[in-house]
Image: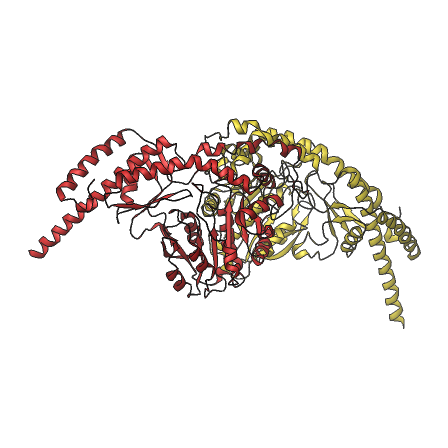
Chain colours: A yellow, B red
Amino acid sequence: MLSYIKMSRKELESEIKELGIEYEQFKSRGLQLDMSRGKPGVDQLDLSMAMLTDMELIQNPKSANGADCRNYGILDGIIECKELFARLLEVGAKNIIVGGNSSLNLMYDYIAQCMIHGAGSAPWASLGKIKFACPVPGYDRHFTICESLGIEMINVPMLEDGPDMDILQELIKDSSVKGMFCVPKYSNPEGKTFSAETVRRIAALKPAASDFRVIWDNAYCVHDLYETGDKLLNIFEAAKEYGNEDIFIEVASTSKISFPGAGVAAIAASDNNIAAIKKRMSAQIIGYDKLNMLRHARFFKDERGVKEHMKKHAAILKPKFEAVLSAFEKELSSLEIATWLKPNGGYFISLNVMDGCAKRVVELCRQAGVVLTPAGATYPYGKDPKDSNIRIAPTYPPVSELKTAVALLCICVRIACAERILNDKVEKVKKIYNKNH
Amino acid sequence: MLSYIKMSRKELESEIKELGIEYEQFKSRGLQLDMSRGKPGVDQLDLSMAMLTDMELIQNPKSANGADCRNYGILDGIIECKELFARLLEVGAKNIIVGGNSSLNLMYDYIAQCMIHGAGSAPWASLGKIKFACPVPGYDRHFTICESLGIEMINVPMLEDGPDMDILQELIKDSSVKGMFCVPKYSNPEGKTFSAETVRRIAALKPAASDFRVIWDNAYCVHDLYETGDKLLNIFEAAKEYGNEDIFIEVASTSKISFPGAGVAAIAASDNNIAAIKKRMSAQIIGYDKLNMLRHARFFKDERGVKEHMKKHAAILKPKFEAVLSAFEKELSSLEIATWLKPNGGYFISLNVMDGCAKRVVELCRQAGVVLTPAGATYPYGKDPKDSNIRIAPTYPPVSELKTAVALLCICVRIACAERILNDKVEKVKKIYNKNH
């Protein structure tokens, strides 16, 4: 196929007309497909069902250290679950707090605590305007936490190997910049993994704010699609060299290992931070759901059990990612209107269309029955300055539905971009005409 | 037995000596008993075990409205669980949010939200010193929430039928008084239920603070010990008459119905408050554990199922409460050194010993191997101004152990009070002596 950029006005008009016919055919099918959220598919959920009728839970509902998991007690989680997360995140078990069902909840609570109590210094709520650096595109729910707590967000572009560290290092000279959320492995939405050099530079940060915090959302720590997954440097080991361990709050969960919403989440942090978090938690809760912790610990047994389990997830997800990528390759690659990366894991594919076209693409899809993540959602305040990024969540629909949805998506991308190029050409002619008259 | 008050110095000395021998006998037994926290006993936990291997959860993990409870979605809880709490709390299902495993967590988050966002007005954290009225004796964890968030606590004595409303009505004329926690049914620790008149007076409160909130912790709403339990007036119905529904945030949980820490908690609130809480929650979490909600909804089926289940709890708990009360009756009633109430439900018996003796009693028990709730814990800042109140939690130990623990407790009460009276007599004599010389 010819690049749209190189097409004449006439060629573009004819292309748009043909695409319009294809689009209307899709529309007439009355599709109802959803690629908006990073939800596991039903077959992935089925992988963990044995956990729900674990007879051992009845015969012996006690944790390895003897605590009855059916009763009150143990603020920071049962030992076997701590150890499981400790191995997955490569930290000591004493540096783990096992929480409830949601790492988002742990992150929100951590930042809310910083607002009320501060992070070793004055309460953030007492400091007037405070700011967070936000690698973009990023995870909308991180932005929502900041926005809901009145934290101003400043975009930091994602480069190939993580956030633009030169910009970040400049930003943190401002002591009102208090932190940053990031997804260092298989980033949401681009699927990038921070390089060792980037991790080291983050580990070495010397922010003006002594109470600066990086929320290291390691949501996809074991979520490889291929045998050799990306390797992420251990942030705590890297930070230790610079005496910077207190800057990092790492979270993870089994939401996309066992069940989203019925899994187990955890925090990994330095000794100082664990103590501070436990102190706040002791006013907030008596303890999280230990039966669910026990269910998980017994089902997965150990780190190896989790990794074997994740291979089953990968086997289900690989064809889905590949269906999207091969459609992009086939339908979009030569047109010079869109770019994308091939992630080695995680839950998303990030599609960058021509500037100013993302909203139109999402709207065209919506009108034909395919729901995508709203354009702009991958940026703070829902504002993608280039209106270019679209997050594709290929995990939930079955492959057949996914193929249909992506076929439509490609048509919508082509329509929106062809229209845009054509429009630009017309505007350009108009301008020349106006200049000459 | 003779009242200690009427005993001579000599009689007291001989009594203390005899009690000391009994005490040493207990001490030599190396007891390790715990009556400190309101934990269900193992036989109570066994009542709900079938829930943990519910095969239907595997065959059909969907909620009544079709949502797959294993996946993301539904911020405010599945409909069948909402309906269950709605019936138990006598409100509409639309006025229920089903949360995680902990009503304490829901309360903390609500107050933390008030600190950060306010309750329809300025953020509480921005207002300088704010205060809560605290019915005393009360629940230590309510006080801990206030203390951890820097809310000043003001004692309001509990009368026979609830907090002293005259004092409360006076207090709320101060607009910095922003709220009150209370346990209106089978109060912690006294087991009192607020009378209809008290509920109506609370419902009619006209606080100076427009953002005043009462946290109506209905922890023991179905926790009757006898067929005819206490009746608590519906706070929302009462408040409606005064246009006061927005003042009340009610919480409850199945912690002492199914499993503490692995149960389900809920909030009941006005339409306005439900909307405000959901708005904050949408930044905090994607949704709570719906599989555990489904487990509970299917196990209990409906309100009647819960009430039948609670009769089984009552059958286990009644002998425990009665063991404590009959020991008090037998060992303490004629001595004029202690008073207590006989609760019709809940989890505690509140023992008031002679002023200045509670700490000593708890310490004597501790030294002989019986752990009680720390004296003072039932008051804000851990300070019982009279050093008189001791919270007895009779639910966890088996009856035989409980009897041993209470026998020791009675001896410790007698020792501490006899010593006190004797000491007072000596001091009095000293004073007279000093006056005459």
Residue sitting nearer the eye, B123 or B291: B291
What residue appears at the point 47 percent right and 49 percent down from the top-left corner? Answer: B218
Q: Work out which residue is located at the far front of the displayed protein and give it.
A: B228
Horizontal side, residue A338 vs residue B383: left or right: right
Horizontal side, residue A194 vs residue A275: left or right: right
Horizontal side, residue B226 vs residue A199: left or right: left
Residue A406 at what x, y percent from top left? Answer: 80, 44
Residue A383 at what x, y percent from top left? Answer: 69, 57
Location of the C terminus of chain A by quadrant is bottom right
Q: Is residue B301 visible in the rendered structure shown here? A: yes
Q: Work out which residue is located at the far bottom of the displayed protein and give it.
A: A437
Residue sitting nearer the eye, A364 or A305: A364
Horizontal side, residue A3 vs residue A34: left or right: right
Q: Quadrant of residue B1?
A: top left
What residue appears at the point 87 percent right and 58 percent down from the top-left corner? Answer: A422
In the rendered picture of this protein, how many numbered marks are placed on residues? 0
In the figure, A398 relative to A169: above or below?
above
Residue A311 at what x, y percent from top left? Answer: 67, 31
